[in-house]
Amino acid sequence: MRVRFWGVRGSLPSPLLPSQVRDKLSEILRQALPGDFVDSKSKRRFLEGLPPWLLGTVGANTSCLSVGIDGFDEHIVFDCGSGMRELGVSPVSQYSKYHVFLSHFHWDHLQGFPFFVPAFKPTVDIDFYSPKPGFDKYLMDMMQEPYHPIRMEYMASKKTFHVLESPVEVGPATVSYRKMSHPGDAFAYKVSHGGKSFIYATDAELDAGDFIKNEENIAFFEGVDVAVVDSQYTPLEAIEKYKWGHSPYNMVVEFAVNWGIKHLVLFHHDPTSDDKKLYEMLRSSRQYLSLIFGEGIDISLACEGMEIIL
């Protein structure tokens, strides 16, 4: 499986402002020494030693991931955030059929579909999946006046809607689901294929029930290879925003340890968190793991354009 990240935010942040670009450049120059600019080798060494938040951006698009499976010429997609537009124009993701699994129906997880280029092609099939009965109406309602000038039925692709009642086979993979705690409900999804497993659990406020070693939880969470989990808040923010439907990074680390997850990816970043803060949260997560639990889990920060191969 190949997991690609097209959108990683909880809702759209402000674009990177000129002042923020200047701040990054100023900090880069502040860290530079005369010897860092002697030749191309010293320049390269200096740039490679800079913290990652200075050299790029985590990304500003909202939630969208895709999963590709070698030998399977269809594509699995999770959520239709604004990152879906990036998926649709990417040369690495041009398929004739997409399987789109929706975690829930808040705007930031839908707003990319009206701009998903493959949806306008008559040669493309799109199968949508959700455990919510009648969810097709949610998608159709957002694509009509006054919200959008093009109705869904005018998009030339063939669209089919599947209400999930049990795990579903998508080509050689199995996709299962579990309800998570979030206002209005949200669903986590698990892809299993070839002895590997991947979980997408955005918009989830973890609670005690997610740690219980019962049959359902063991089957879904235990020993997963890669888990992309909502880690929007710091511990203090989580206290201030109790029941807002998102998790603090320290609790997500505890969750990963509890279930023996091999690789944890921090996801659904707060729109007010700049790149520096997000990388500080990543560093704090790794320190928390090391100090409290020891090693044994890889922790990454979800960034647009990154790819994980299972």
Image (spheres, helix red, strand yellow):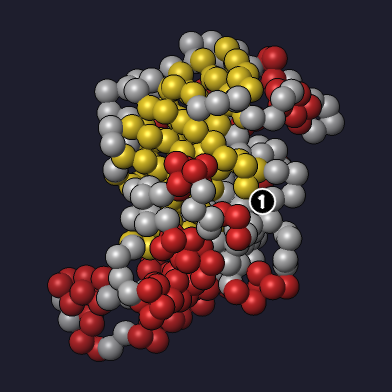
Residue 182 showing in the rendered view:
yes
Decide if residue 96 is on the left or right side of residue 235. left
For the N terminus, the quadrant is top left
Relative depth, front residue between 130 and 21? 130
Relative depth, front residue between 257 and 26? 257
Q: Residue reaching furthest front?
A: 214
Decide if residue 27 is on the left or right side of residue 142. left
**Residue 242 falls in which quadrant of the image?**
bottom right
Q: Position of residue 71 (x, y in %)?
A: 27, 23
**Residue 309 falls in which quadrant of the image?**
top left
For the C terminus, the quadrant is top left
Relative vertical location of residue 188 with respect to residue 162 in this rendering, above or below: below
Q: Residue at x 66, y 69 (%)?
A: 238
Q: How many marks?
A: 1
Q: Position of residue 261 (x, y in %)?
A: 38, 55
- Give the residue pinned by disc 1: 181
Q: Residue at x 49, y 33 (%)?
A: 176
**Residue 195 falls in which quadrant of the image?**
top left
Q: Residues within 10 Å of mark 1 (few under 14, many from 20)?
A: some
Q: Position of residue 295 (x, y in %)?
A: 30, 70
Query: Could you say whether the residue bearing mark 1 is in a helix, strand or loop?
Result: loop
Tag 1: amino acid: Ser
